[in-house]
Image (tube, rainbow, N blue to C red):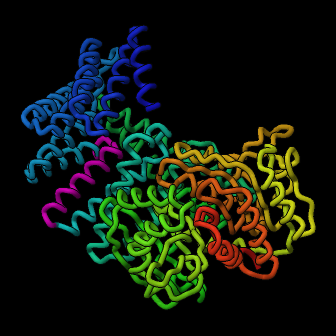
Amino acid sequence: MQALAAFTQALSIAQDIDDWQGEAAAFNNLADMNAKGGEYETALELYQQALEVAEQAHDQRGAGIAYSNIGQSLLALQRYDEALEHFEQALAIAQQPQQLGNREVSNREGEAVALNNLGHFHYDRQAYRQALDYFQQALKLAQQHHLSLNEGVAQSNIAQVQKAQGQASAAIASLQKAIVAFESIQSQLTVESLLAGYAAQQTTSYQQLVAWLWEDKKYTAAFDYAERARAQAFLNQLRGQGIDLYTETTSPLIQEERALLRKITGLQIERAAASEQQTQDQALLNRLTNDIEQAQTEYAALLTRIKLAAPEHATLLSVTPSITLPQVRDQVLDAQTTLVEYFVTDEHTFAWVVDRQGIHMAKLNITAGELRTQIDKLRPEVKDTEEANAVASALYDVLVAPLVAYLEQPNLTIVAHGPLHYLPFAALWNAERAHYLIEDYTLTFAPSASALPLIYAKRNPNEGRLLALGNPNNDLLDAEREVQAIARLYGVQPAVRKAASEGQIYANAGQVDILHLSAHGDLNKHNPLFSAIELAADEGQDGNLEVHEIYGLNLTGVNLVTLSACETALGEQSQGDELVGLTRAFLYAGAPSVITTLWSVQADTTADLMVKFYTYLRNGETVAGALQKAQIELLDNYSPYHWAAFTLTGDYHGGE
């Protein structure tokens, strides 16, 4: 609703000041919203208004885009003849050179889009030969003019045709090429571009490829692309944000990486501009292509140097998985741990179960949409044990029951995906045994399997040094009592109210084993890098410890970060990136274990649980074991609302 109001206001302003570009953009934005909602008749009318504005302004590119958009709406409305006419008109416009000043510029990108649209028209009519011809024309054009995004789209479209014709291996190969093309341009895109169609296209491609590889019984390759998808989603958060990830070891290398990436991006933009010239300078294009290839070779070598100097930092710069499925089994997991990695698609959910004894795979009969519906139903009902257990039982039956035969170890490490980031796994209910999942296993979560070796390498000797901050805004009195009780267990003074400041983190966090923060949290699902923990302001600090700032912390030596009573209040489900962003920021900063909450928890029972947790921890339990025992103590007397929100990400052990 906020976006609708903003676009409507933008349209009104553009019309008042005779800004035809702004007016056309507003019509297109409003039309896009209606098209995404299935309101194709309304979208059609708005796209037609955008076309009128573009034609009045003699804007060829804008008119071509409008014709393509109108064709898409007509196709959705099954008005096939009209759709074909508009797609052909869009192609004709794109093929006409546009006069810019004293020179003519070709619209190769618009031409590739129009060819892909014509291919889609025939694909939807199951005219696969004609569809393939148009897609191949689009691919050839994109490759000739170095249009990587259009190349990726064309390769993906060719894969759909090959799949429809039963050519599974060829379809997989084409989709792999599409992903390579998409990944090659991510550094050039702005956040706005990522939030538009690019990220969605990329996500769909990964999902399809994992599913197709699974169907082809290439389970290890499917696992690799599931890991790659996670890395790409995370990388999309970081690119273009100016996050300071320097360390004393990597600073010169990272500065070199940024400079080289800027060079590659600049050369690619220059080559694309040269390709659009009506009269092309082939010698210039050849030189630019050679320069790009050389710079990319240098970049690959630089990543190797960064990986040797700082392996974790290298994972933030590349989507290539740093570990294989057999390596997870043989080198990463200990004898007491089972890894379950989920990957959610629009059709199914896939799971890999790995321990020292073997690797098992399962295709689970639940879609992303069904998961969102079930989790949205469960979360409001966690305050009522009976109601919560009814939904949690259905989720247990589909997500855990098919895997139970392989869950033989006491420690369960889960790599969630998509809607599963919002699921309180601890509260999944085994109706047959009348047990919660937390009663059968200690539960730990990981951002990816590739992150586990880096996380385990952070284990430090635990000397019991605690920094506890609570009630910074003086509105969480139970939280203040909580940190006071925890501090007494460790024989230290807590920092409360105004003393619970952001500056305390910067001054002391690297000198403790445990960092405990009992404060409000604000998770930003639109830009996860600006999710924040609300501490007290002090000199030079606004009090909001944001994710991008956490990446710059030095938490080397810290074994555990606990975010207690954070009132995260997630609201509408996103992809879960805000959760991964917050926890992974602390992991990157140096802490191997992070405890967070999935919803706004009640302060008094949270204090009770946290005191029990730290008591067990002081008595020698692992972090996962201490949390499990504290949760079990509460579950007989309290609904899942009071204990199931707490999740541990990272290392189940939490120190040496």
| Foreground pick, 139 / 387 | 387
Which residue is at a point 19% across and 48% down the rendered structure image? 135
Would you say the magenta stretch is mainly helix, strand or loop? helix
- Residue 436 vs residue 561: left or right? left
Magenta stretch, residue numbers: 143-166
Query: Compared with residue 462, is residue 501 higher up or lower down, i.e. above or below?
Result: above
Query: Compared with residue 96, is residue 354 higher up or lower down, i.e. above or below?
Result: below
- Quarter residue 99 falls in: top left
* Residue 354 x %, y %: 48, 82
Quarter occupied by the C terminus: bottom right
Query: Compared with residue 362, is residue 257 higher up or lower down, i.e. above or below?
Result: above
Which residue is at a point 15% across and 30% down the rendered structure image? 86
Q: Residue furthest bottom?
A: 357
Which residue is at a point 72% across and 56% down the rendered structure image? 603
Which residue is at a point 21% across and 54% down the rendered structure image? 158
| Foreground pick, 154 / 348 | 348
- Residue 402 vs residue 448: left or right? left
* Residue 450 x %, y %: 54, 70
Q: Confirm whether residue 614 shows in the render.
A: yes
| Foreground pick, 629 / 239 | 629
